[in-house]
Image: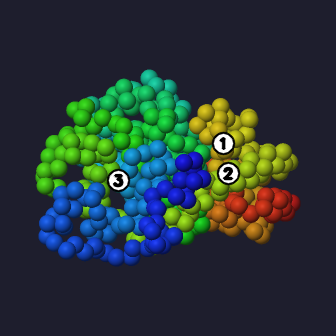
Amino acid sequence: MQDETKCLHSGYTPENGGPRVMPIYQSTTFRYTSTQEIAAVFDDPTRSHIYSRFTNPTVDVVEKKIADLEHAVAAMCTSSGQMASLMSVLNLCSAGDSFISTSAIYGGTVNLFAYTLKKLGIECIFVDVDADEDEIQSKIKPNTKAIFGETLTNPSLQIFDIEKFARVAHSNGLPLIVDNTFATPILCKPVDFGADVVIHSTSKYMDGHALQVGGVIADSGKFDYTNGKFPEFTEPDESYHGTIYTRDYAFAPYIIKARMQLMRDFGAYPSGHSGFLLNIGLETLAIRMKRYCENAMTVAEYLSNHPKVEHVNYPGLKDNKYYTLAQKYLPDGQSGVMAVTLKGGKESGIKFMDSLKMASNEVHVADIRTCVLHPASATHRQLSDEQLIACGISPGLVRLSVGLENVYDILKDIDCALDNI
Ligand code: PLP
């Protein structure tokens, strides 16, 4: 099946006379008629459902659909993108371990990696997204357990060279984790370029309608966890009746371990109703992504020729530093998000934002509706102009997430707002 078809049909086929639309299983638990049957499910959690803290039939459909779209063998939904980032690392690292991440990642993930994981005894070693292989290699230590990066970085819109990082990871026996939130599997399938684990904040394009926060982790099923670096995968798990993940679940040891250890113990799992809403978003993901990219390209080209605009950062533009990498990893489009620097600094940014009539001023990105954020007056308002520049955010920078309205209405709104500056 092609992606448009997978979005609609993967994961759920109604039985004869069954509901056409995937039902919501809004139930904490599932009934068995004998102790023998429930024991069998405890022995092998892939057989059926036990308790909605870690599996649920509605969420299961969504997991199968996302795994299929990502060319992965299995997936597990989480209650937020943050939880997907956290669990993707915790499934590999314990106190005393380290992992490498590019510094160009979502700010919330930087915080999680640099501060919260540090408190748990896990060290994140940051590396520049443009670092060469020798530099990445120089950061690897005997206790390093993974490498992490974002396909299309939020908010700097840099492109993570997946094959470069995969080469370094694999030559050191390490799995590569890729946050594919902004690209979605429609624009890029990181597994095809060597990623071993793919995560998402489904709150963004996958849900698409700004309805709910969520996340997902997908397992390529390709990484060899028996290489001696991952004893938790190859030795009996005393917390789960002696299961050896690489032996008992050889097809997807990473995701089964994440579910049976982390999700079972932390319980950050979406409800059946959340799974249902996410599925509605996924059904139109492929066609929405196409339109986001078309609209964004039109807006980016328009803005780059506007006299009140200093710079447009959109990797689909030919003069963008990441254009060549974007053509390799995201040939069908580079999402709807761009960063626009207005002439006239913070004052221009504020006037522009306050003059928009249709685009909403909000922290969210990747919504179906066009939305904008001016970091200097919102998320980063405590910083001086000098401090903003030091963080790579110019005072006149506006993050623009182009939605699915008619592109001429989007342009009209932007144009009128620019007139007011
Ligand atoms: N990863 C990326 C690339 C994001 O942009 C975000 C949120 O903006 C997250 C992860 C965290 O996701 P959530 O807000 O769903 O917890």
Residue at mark 2: C-beta within 8 A of ligand 1: no
- The residue tagged 3 is 87
Callout count: 3
Choose top left, top right, bottom left or bottom right for residue 305. top right
The percent position of residue 97, horizontal first and vertical second, equals 27, 41
Residue ID at (40%, 71%):
271
Is residue 329 in view from this perspective?
yes
Residue 230 appears left or right of 344: left
- On residue 381, the disc is none
Asked whether the residues under the numbered discs 3 and 1 touch, taking CB atoms below 8 Å apart as contact, a structural biologist would say: no
Q: What is the three-letter code of the residue carrying label 2?
A: Lys
Callout 3: SS: helix
Is 73 situated above or below 325? below
Looking at this view, is 85 or 54 the one in front? 54
The percent position of residue 78, horizontal first and vertical second, equals 40, 60
Looking at this view, is 413 or 295 the one in front? 295
- The residue tagged 2 is 290
The percent position of residue 45, horizontal first and vertical second, equals 25, 58
* Mark 2 or 3, closer to the camera: 2
Query: Which of marks 1 and 3 precedes in the sequence?
Result: 3
Residue 109 appears left or right of 89: right
* Mark 3 or 1, closer to the camera: 1
Callout 1: SS: loop
The percent position of residue 136, horizontal first and vertical second, equals 43, 29
Residue at mark 3: C-beta within 8 A of ligand 1: no
Query: Which of marks 3 and 2 precedes in the sequence?
Result: 3
Q: Within 10 Å of the Cα at label 1, are there few (<14), some (14-19), or many (20+) other Cα atoms?
A: some
- The residue tagged 1 is 332
Residue 280 appears left or right of 342: left
Residue at mark 1: C-beta within 8 A of ligand 1: no
Residue 163 appears left or right of 256: right
